[in-house]
Image (cartoon, rainbow, N blue to C red):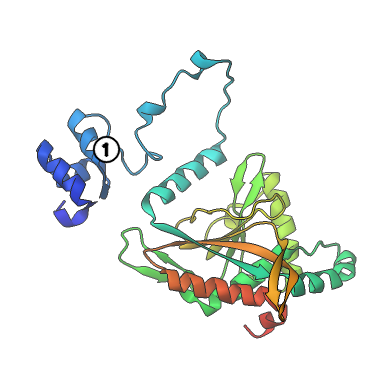
Amino acid sequence: MSDKDFIASPAVVAYAGRKGVDLSDVARKSGRTNLAREDVDQHLDGSAPIGPNVGGGDQRYWDVDHAAFGPVTEEPVTRIASLAADNLSAANRMIPQVTHHDRADMRALEAFRKSLKAEASVKGLKLTALAFHIKALSLTLQAFPLFNSSLSADGTTLIRKQYCHIGVAVDTPHGLMVPVIRDADRKGLWQISAEIADLAKRAGERKLRPDEMGGASMSVSNLGGIGGTAFTPLVNPPEVAILGITRAETVPVWENEAWQPVLMAPLDLSYDHRVINGADAARFLSHYARLLADPRRMLFA
């Protein structure tokens, strides 16, 4: 491994030099490419390296007898939660993630959604705002195709996807699951709404098929039904971005020379900075917010 195969700050390089440590050797033995002072120390004491499959640090320091401080109970981590933890730990460690925040005017969308309530009831459906979010996201991905891509594992190739599949994070008693709505750009609101309900129900029952998971263009994490004003969702690799949604609230907005009460939905877009820059993210979320603010635009996006 050459000195071009790892990244280290000048301070880490100087520290390794004082300790007589070859950083190329540290990178090769640890399997890490972004080296810190702790990696040099690990190398010197000969303990197990902080390799790419270890979730976030030297776990020896987590091996604490918690019962020494008070009563405790223990329960096994579910397989689903364990897999999600490994994936998200790797994502947080290896992907330079940035979150861009914006909000969308939801007045027109909510009025339109409520006007369809009777029709939805006849169809046996509950038309939620999430269906509109997924439709708007699929159209925004068409307008900004860079977000509908993946970076190869070695970081040398950008894979451009010709399909549009949207992952929907579902909170279940067994852990977080992300079923996928295939070809969301080709589906109407009724079909998207029906699929959301079906996938969420079967996710909770652990009845999802393998082909209903994975392969998403981008994912949505919706906390609107619970609460919060903002959060930082983690990119779900190999996707390069994820959209977070929290509860819409009525806030004062200066409009037509007066303060108006406006229903606004907070939006949180996390993205892989190796592929997407800040200006791209701002334009993406602005376009997305415009679609929500005027649902008619979805007909011409």
In x, y percent, where is residue 132?
Answer: 70, 69
Residue annotated with mark 1: 38
Amino acid tagged 1 = Glu
Residue 298 sits above or below residue 1 on the image: below
Q: Position of residue 238 (x, y in %)?
A: 45, 59
Q: x, y (%) of residue 17?
A: 11, 42
Q: Residue at x 78, y 69 (%)?
A: 110
> Crowding at label 1, few (<14), some or many (≥20) Cα neighbours within 10 Å?
some
Which image quarter holds the C terminus? bottom right
In the picture, measured across the screen, residue 259 lies left or right of residue 164, that is: right
- Could you tell me if residue 121 is visible in this image? yes
To which quarter of the image does residue 183 belong? bottom right
Which residue is more in the foreground, 92 or 119?
A: 92
Residue 251's quadrant in the figure? bottom right
Horizontal relation, residue 32 to residue 212: left or right:
left
- x%, y% of residue 181? 63, 63
Q: Nearer the viewer, residue 110 or 216?
A: 110
Residue ranking furthest to the front: 257
157 left or right of 87?
left
Question: SS class of the residue under badge 1?
Answer: helix
**Image point (73%, 56%), residue name:** 198
Residue displayed at 80% across by 74% down: 112
- Would you place residue 139 above or below residue 49 in this image? below
Image-quadrant location for residue 89? top left
Would residue 267 appear left or right of 58 to someone viewing this image?
right
**From the viewer's perspective, is residue 113 above or below residue 301?**
above
Residue at 65%, 47% in the rendered image: 171
Tell me, yes or no, if residue 148 can be seen here.
Answer: no
